[in-house]
Amino acid sequence: MSDPLKPVSIAILGPGTVGSEVVRLLTAQAEDLAARVGAPLEIAGIYVRDTSKDRGPNIPRALLTDDASALVAKADVVVELMGGIEPARTLILEAIASGASVVTANKALLAQHGPELYEAADAANVDLYFEAAVAGAIPLVRPVRESLAGDHISRILGIVNGTTNYILDEMTMRGLDYDVALKQAQELGYAEADPTADVEGHDAAAKAAILASLAFHQRVAMDDVYCEGISAVTSEDVIAARETDQVIKLLAIAERTADGVAVRVHPALVPMTHPLAGVHGAFNAVFVEAESAGGLMFYGQGAGGTPTASAVLGDLVSVARHKASGGKGPHESNYAEHEVLPIEAALTRYCVRMSVEDRPGVLSAVAEVFARHDVGIEIVRQVPGQTHAGLILSTYSAPERDLRATVSDLEASDAVAEVKSVLRIEGE
Amino acid sequence: MSDPLKPVSIAILGPGTVGSEVVRLLTAQAEDLAARVGAPLEIAGIYVRDTSKDRGPNIPRALLTDDASALVAKADVVVELMGGIEPARTLILEAIASGASVVTANKALLAQHGPELYEAADAANVDLYFEAAVAGAIPLVRPVRESLAGDHISRILGIVNGTTNYILDEMTMRGLDYDVALKQAQELGYAEADPTADVEGHDAAAKAAILASLAFHQRVAMDDVYCEGISAVTSEDVIAARETDQVIKLLAIAERTADGVAVRVHPALVPMTHPLAGVHGAFNAVFVEAESAGGLMFYGQGAGGTPTASAVLGDLVSVARHKASGGKGPHESNYAEHEVLPIEAALTRYCVRMSVEDRPGVLSAVAEVFARHDVGIEIVRQVPGQTHAGLILSTYSAPERDLRATVSDLEASDAVAEVKSVLRIEGE
């Protein structure tokens, strides 16, 4: 330890909900934190665009500054809580260049520019910690990076968006329609007035990119992530799922195959007995499959000012401790260069629900379409209907491109009136 | 980093299931591990009592030695996988005294002598890591120690014994009787021929002591842990639980109250919607309640050679990395000296199931007993019976001593034929 009494100086960029909670905790728990860090933590300043605006009781006016670059230049640790790409990216690069360590909760930035930032931090020998960017309060980065350092992760399945999990859970547990559940989520503040980023899976896709980078030491950007939201999920889908002891979840999936790394976000059927099926409400959970450890799950609140502040503070203690003792934390600097596979190459199982003509020979015609594309059928369930019969088929695992071609031919088939839904099956 | 090419020398004590898997992985992943540590890992030797015995293909004979002290003296890192108290305790103290860091999976030792060992490691400025001792493969120590370093843990609820969770889960999901489920667990190898350590809660109590020490920076030994097993749980209890949307789980509970720290192991009623209720089979999970982060859960395999080896190897990479760079990991050296509270002081809710005389005035007589001890009744359910009526009462939270006095008076009451079961309610 260089000098245990020299304070570690902290710059806070962005005094929003998370930022002001971090500042409050830094003050309220100053003594405790100093003991854990091995040196006192001192707030060098708080960057805001407008210093004249009142920021509430937690944010002392004297600490406000509108000169972010000057603030960053004098800090040992920069805590970036502004969100957005710029100026966050430039300020983090300035911090790294001046030898400061960085803590950020900015998932959009990491999903787009993560590799650039990780490499800059590595080259400058400083820490870049981002626990709060992946799944809010849930500790994921340390377990994946350190606890599993002697293991190999093969797959990650995550419920990483609370809004969509809330909506799907309400549809499942209370039989609500999608529109009603969405409206309820908006009334409760779980969903925004424009819910696109959540319900179309964009938020989950950003987190999937970060998770994949973390798990496979691999450069994955948000554009590499195949993304499908939940707005097409109907209560019929939910009921059909329950009849076969499954629930529908929006999953962020990152997996390593022999050919490369595949990253995707889409609604999926999950068996009721899978631990992810028990994740209710707006909670998040990430299920990690590792070679030796087997299945591990990490569960908690994926958003919210106070939980996110807990994750930021945990990171802050770690990087400040490294600063105080003149070192830095473990990093994975050797990135792998696996191919990031397109969705067509993913191996999945499908559950296809359709209405078909109610006459002999239909099942055989449908089966022939699957056989034509080499897609094995595991289970067929017929459901009597009024004008048409219902048919629910679950396939064996097959490449997505074959499954798509099958569905496309089904849609063109005389025997099939309508393909009502196509859901991938995961977690088995 | 002092000298990136100087190997870190590892002593393995105990070549059992976990040990030989660790040795196998050290060899199979040598290159990967060296990259993560920053130096190659070299097995200095493997201690066994009898060097003439063959230990299988993973354990090279040339590395075997029966001189544990000599082996420990020349190692940078000692991996203790022998189990039991002695000679494990003495060898770990020898390792610490000689400046080696230690990785251990020995829960019995830590539950009894943890504080002595943690303090010795602190004084000698070496690492003592024990991820595998708490819940097998589940990463808990890093999340609790580091990710939550800026937060305050108020309570931990853990399913930390796979055998009892398997038995209770079979009783719940398949309606088996306790004896049948136990026999099935024995046939599948989940339970031993003498299942006492598992079913009476002793194994869970050892882990509870370690968890409490970890969460509250507090010296807690196994003798401080109140312990009640599952052998008295009946299928009637399981059915009554299900009728109120609850399941019975054996929980290890550590909580901080205004008066001190309480640590206990007993069967408990958990609401079906609680994430712990979804932990099936022989899996383990630990639910952590923290002030800012809220509820977090960590789930995975709590036992087994390969999962445990994954946790050991994660620890090994961390401590070897610290050795290679001349440092050590974060430690909590300032132990708190809260009082460890007796079970009588614990605040709990009870569910009391009894058979009562089937005549007017009985409910009033029963209610009077609760009122006499100041225990509030939240819900009463009457169940018609043949000779007696059934009565199921759930109380509000009250000190255990008052609840016990209430039950004792109920047993003496003319109105009550039999108190059939008393279960604490947790996780609400």
Image (cartoon, coloured by chain):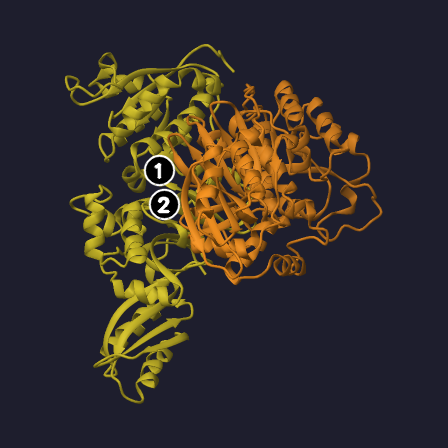
Chain colours: A yellow, B orange
Q: Nearer the viewer, residue A159 or B290?
A: B290
Count of picture labels: 2
Quarter of the rendering occupied by the N terminus of chain B? top right
Q: Position of residue A334 (x, y in %)?
A: 46, 40
Q: Nearer the viewer, residue A228 or A279?
A: A279
Could you confirm whether marks 1 and 2 are on the same chain?
yes
Q: Which residue is tagged 1? A: A136
Q: Residues within 10 Å of mark 2 (few under 14, many from 20)?
A: many
Three-letter amino acid code at the position of disc 1: Gly
Q: Nearer the viewer, residue A288 or B1?
A: A288
The answer to whether marks 1 and 2 mark residues whose Cβ atoms lie closer than 8 Å is: yes
The answer to whether residue A126 is visible is yes
Q: Secondary structure at mark 2?
A: strand
Q: Tell me where residue B323 sits by quadrant.
A: top right
Q: Tell me where residue B73 sits by quadrant.
A: top right
Number of the label disc, if any, that sits on residue A284: 2
Q: Secondary structure at mark 1?
A: loop
B305 relative to A380, above or below: above
Which of the chains bears the disc numbered 1?
Answer: A
The answer to whether residue A289 is visible is no
Of the numbered discs 1 and 2, the one sitting upstream in the chain is 1
Three-letter amino acid code at the position of disc 2: Asn
A310 relative to B49, above or below: above
